[in-house]
Image (spheres, rainbow, N blue to C red):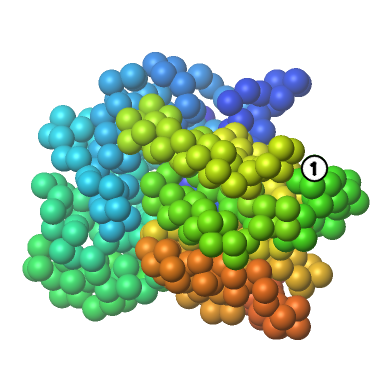
């Protein structure tokens, strides 16, 4: 394979599970998500993407996607269970999300995680040209920066954590805390969604590694590791263009008709995950129906729960609980031909999501903990008319940027109920003011602004960011 000056390393390749009819590979895009975030950047910048192709015991040669070259990394069934389902998503994921679900510590998972991280590092080292920049993404690959530094000391190494980084007292629970911290700090630049994460890492580097640390740099092993907050964003122009398409506007109108032409539509779009606060949201809405504050004929809720990690036991249990609660609410409060909640456990393409965003009078984004939450940003981008309400968890990274949303503590069910009512009954002029402020901010800080900020910080020469359009 040819070598590249920019290499992206992520757990998954950004590919559809099946090729297009002509055999070409296409981008796999999910609500929010890494592939969606990087799509606009890598359309403009020639690069190689190293990642798992989603299959078991296979790493076939895959065609390029435009100027993006693809380097697959294979996983066996045992590795998938230990590295991905085990250490990444049953140990790190819950711990990094405030231990909303109890993390599981299994020594065998760690060994597999370490071995798979080494394979990713070796693949990246192989495809990187001398002096290249290698941009490693997220918690699945937290050991890769240091492993790469040992293999290729000539390259620039960036690491970006898309999820929250926990406070020191939670991180200290990890049996392999020193190795994980050293692994991440093998990078030249470690990026986070929020400044608090950099502060947490600085405290840990001082405590566990004896490093001299501030919130923006860590002196470790005779070199400087720079850290900082780079809040990730979306391709605003793409979502605006989608939401303006006549066929999507027409689809949104049809959706409202299909819902029974209610006066108000609430929408939530989440991965099916215990961090997303879906159960708290259903409880709040159920109580509003019970108390008569919301009427089924007048108001309807649409909950999209995109399937996620279906082989992990805790996710299957969660799906069953949510489906049971939706059934209970519809059985108790729905009427013939009028469901209280329309629940959809299926993937949606971006055109269908844009139509849903146009349909929703209130977008309810209430995770218990979230690194950023790009669905909130997609909704704001789609609302060119300046209408609509965004109810947003204080514990999503997006809350720091969208101060004009209806911010809420999702753990407080009574507070969530009151906030939902505020958003449903808000004065239209106030909603336009809030939406205008959020749209102005989002337009300034889109996905390309994020990439320029991070890549310029990684490579002060400006070479990496030079190809990104203004």
Which residue is painted at 61% across and 38% down in the image?
344
User: x%, y% of residue 130?
Assistant: 42, 48
210 is higher (above) or lower (below) than 154: below
User: x%, y% of residue 246?
Assistant: 90, 51
214 or 334: nearer the eye? 334
| 154 left or right of 72 in image | left
Figure disc tally = 1
232 or 212: nearer the eye? 232
| 139 left or right of 107 in image | right
Quarter of the view holding residue 200: bottom left
Which residue is painted at 28% across and 47% down in the image?
101
Residue neighbourhood size for the residue with mark 1, other residues' Cα within 10 Å, grouped as few (<14), some (14–19), many (≥20): few
| 360 left or right of 344 in image | right
User: x%, y% of residue 233?
Assistant: 57, 62
221 or 345: nearer the eye? 345
Residue 303 seen: yes
335 or 309: nearer the eye? 335
Residue 12 seen: no
102 is higher (above) or lower (below) than 126: below
Image quadrant where one finds the C terminus: bottom right
User: x%, y% of residue 47?
Assistant: 56, 45
Q: Secondary structure at mark 1?
A: helix
Quarter of the view holding residue 64: top right
Which residue is painted at 72% across and 80% down in the image?
427
| Residue occupied by mark 1 | 258
Quarter of the view holding residue 82: top left
């Amino acid at each position: 394979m040819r070598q590249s000056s920019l290499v992206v390393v992520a757990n998954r390749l950004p590919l559809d599970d099946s090729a297009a009819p002509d055999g070409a590979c296409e981008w796999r895009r999910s609500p929010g998500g890494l592939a969606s975030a990087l799509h606009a950047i890598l359309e403009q910048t020639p690069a190689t993407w190293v990642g798992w192709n989603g299959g078991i015991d296979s790493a076939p040669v895959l065609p390029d996607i435009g100027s993006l070259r693809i380097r697959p990394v294979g996983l066996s069934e045992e590795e998938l269970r230990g590295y991905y389902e085990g250490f990444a998503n049953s140990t790190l994921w819950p711990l990094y999300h405030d231990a909303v679900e109890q993390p599981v510590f299994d020594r065998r998972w760690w060994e597999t995680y370490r071995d798979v991280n080494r394979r990713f590092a070796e693949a990246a080292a192989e495809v990187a040209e001398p002096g290249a920049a290698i941009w490693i993404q997220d918690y699945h690959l937290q050991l890769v920066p240091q492993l790469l530094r040992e293999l290729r000391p000539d390259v620039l190494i960036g690491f970006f954590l898309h999820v929250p980084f926990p406070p020191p007292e939670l991180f200290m629970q990890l049996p392999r805390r020193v190795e994980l911290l050293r692994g991440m700090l093998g990078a030249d630049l470690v990026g986070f969604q929020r400044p608090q994460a950099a502060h947490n890492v600085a405290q840990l580097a001082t405590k566990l590694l004896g490093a001299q640390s501030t919130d923006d740099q860590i002196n470790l092993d005779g070199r400087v590791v720079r850290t900082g907050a780079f809040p990730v964003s979306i391709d605003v122009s793409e979502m605006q263009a989608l939401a303006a398409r006549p066929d999507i506007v027409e689809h949104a109108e049809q959706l409202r008709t299909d819902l029974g032409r209610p006066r108000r539509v609430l929408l939530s779009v989440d991965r099916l995950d215990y961090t997303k606060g879906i159960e708290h949201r259903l409880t709040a809405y159920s109580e509003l129906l019970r108390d008569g504050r919301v009427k089924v004929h007048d108001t309807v809720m649409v909950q999209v729960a995109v399937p996620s990690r279906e082989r992990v036991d805790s996710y299957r249990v969660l799906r069953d609980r949510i489906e049971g609660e939706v059934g209970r609410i519809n059985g108790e409060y729905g009427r013939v031909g009028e469901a209280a909640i329309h629940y959809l456990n299926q993937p949606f393409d971006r055109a269908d999501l844009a139509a849903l965003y146009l349909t929703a009078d209130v977008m309810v984004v209430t995770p218990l903990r979230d690194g950023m939450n790009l669905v909130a940003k997609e909704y704001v981008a789609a609302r060119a008319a300046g209408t609509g309400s965004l109810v947003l968890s204080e514990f999503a990274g997006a809350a720091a940027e969208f101060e004009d949303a209806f911010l809420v503590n999702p753990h407080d069910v009574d507070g969530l109920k009151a906030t939902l009512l505020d958003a449903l009954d808000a004065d239209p002029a106030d909603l336009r003011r809030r939406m205008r402020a959020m749209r102005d901010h989002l337009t300034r800080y889109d996905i390309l602004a994020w990439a320029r900020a991070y890549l310029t910080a990684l490579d002060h020469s400006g070479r990496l960011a030079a190809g990104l359009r203004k």
